[in-house]
């Protein structure tokens, strides 16, 4: 990067941190070197919160952003380390910080660790639909279509869709979710089911 803020890299004396500050840093990080620098800055911010607790971004979120920056450089081991730190850091990360840790585990090839974490989430029956979609997309990207199908199916069951006239169709995620599930099923050579039929609702 061309310059770094004077309160960068762990200097605890700084002003309150806003989401705009974070987004500006991420926007400037375009090369691998810049992304590593951004990850270092984000990690420093996470380690030195504002003394008056006026930051708009939590340490957990900052560590996730930092991990994503390192992942984009190809340093997946370092990214996983930060995802692990984020999972125990202060603050809530939507939809669930463990989704990001699951992603990191798949990136380093730890399929058993990812599966154990996914099973932990599944047993909790999360209310947030995005948890199911996040895990499903990770598995699809990793080429594990069986698990992707499992999580997409849990998502549509969670939405309790019976037909295209249901209120669930007011949720903008519904059509995309059903389409993704049908795509995965077709890749698995699975026969069409009722949810596949609803993937393209009739036009009124």
Image (spheres, rainbow, N blue to C red):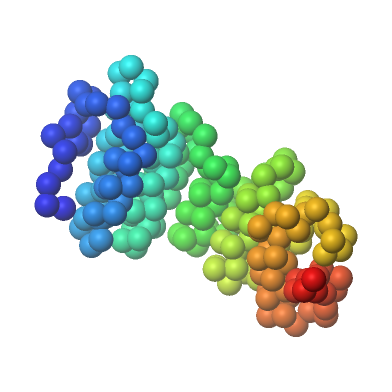
In the rendering, at what x and y percent does residue 119 appear? 69, 49
| 47 versus 195 height, above or below | above
The quarter of the picture where residue 166 lies is: bottom right
- Residue found at the very far front of the displayed protein: 204
Viewport quadrant of the C terminus? bottom right
| 36 versus 192 height, above or below | above
- Residue found at the very far bottom of the displayed protein: 189
The mark tally for this picture is: 0
In the rendering, at what x and y percent does residue 39 appear? 29, 47
Q: Residue at x 37, y 20 (%)?
A: 53
Q: Is residue 48 left or right of residue 144?
A: left
- Residue nearest the observer in this picture, 10 or 120: 10
Residue 204 in view (yes/no): yes
Q: Residue at x 31, y 23 (%)?
A: 50
In the rendering, at what x and y percent does residue 76 appear? 39, 57
The quarter of the picture where residue 82 lies is: top left
Q: Residue at x 38, y 47 (%)?
A: 65
- Residue nearest the observer in this picture, 41 or 175: 175
Q: Residue at x 75, y 82 (%)?
A: 189
- Residue found at the very far top of the displayed protein: 52
Q: Is residue 114 left or right of residue 41?
A: right
Q: Is residue 54 left or right of residue 29?
A: right
Q: Is residue 53 left or right of residue 2?
A: right
Residue 116 in view (yes/no): no
- Residue nearest the observer in this picture, 14 or 20: 20
């Amino acid at each position: 990067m061309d310059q770094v803020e004077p309160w960068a890299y762990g200097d605890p004396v700084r002003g309150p941190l806003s989401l705009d500050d974070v987004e500006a840093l991420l926007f400037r990080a375009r090369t691998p070197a810049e992304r590593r620098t951004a990850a270092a800055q984000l990690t420093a911010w996470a380690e030195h919160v504002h003394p008056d607790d006026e930051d708009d971004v939590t340490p957990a979120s900052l560590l996730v952003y930092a991990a994503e920056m390192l992942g984009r450089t190809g340093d997946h081991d370092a990214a996983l380390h930060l995802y692990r730190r984020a999972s125990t850091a202060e603050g809530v990360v939507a939809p669930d910080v463990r989704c990001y840790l699951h992603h990191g585990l798949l990136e380093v090839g730890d399929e058993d660790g990812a599966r154990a974490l996914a099973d932990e989430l599944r047993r909790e029956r999360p209310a947030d639909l995005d948890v199911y979609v996040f895990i499903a997309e990770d598995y699809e990207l990793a080429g594990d279509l069986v698990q992707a199908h499992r999580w997409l199916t849990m998502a549509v069951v969670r939405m309790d869709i019976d037909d295209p006239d249901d209120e669930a169709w007011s949720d903008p995620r519904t059509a995309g979710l059903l389409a993704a599930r049908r795509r995965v099923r077709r890749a698995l050579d699975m026969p069409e089911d009722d949810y596949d039929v609803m993937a393209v609702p009739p036009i009124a």
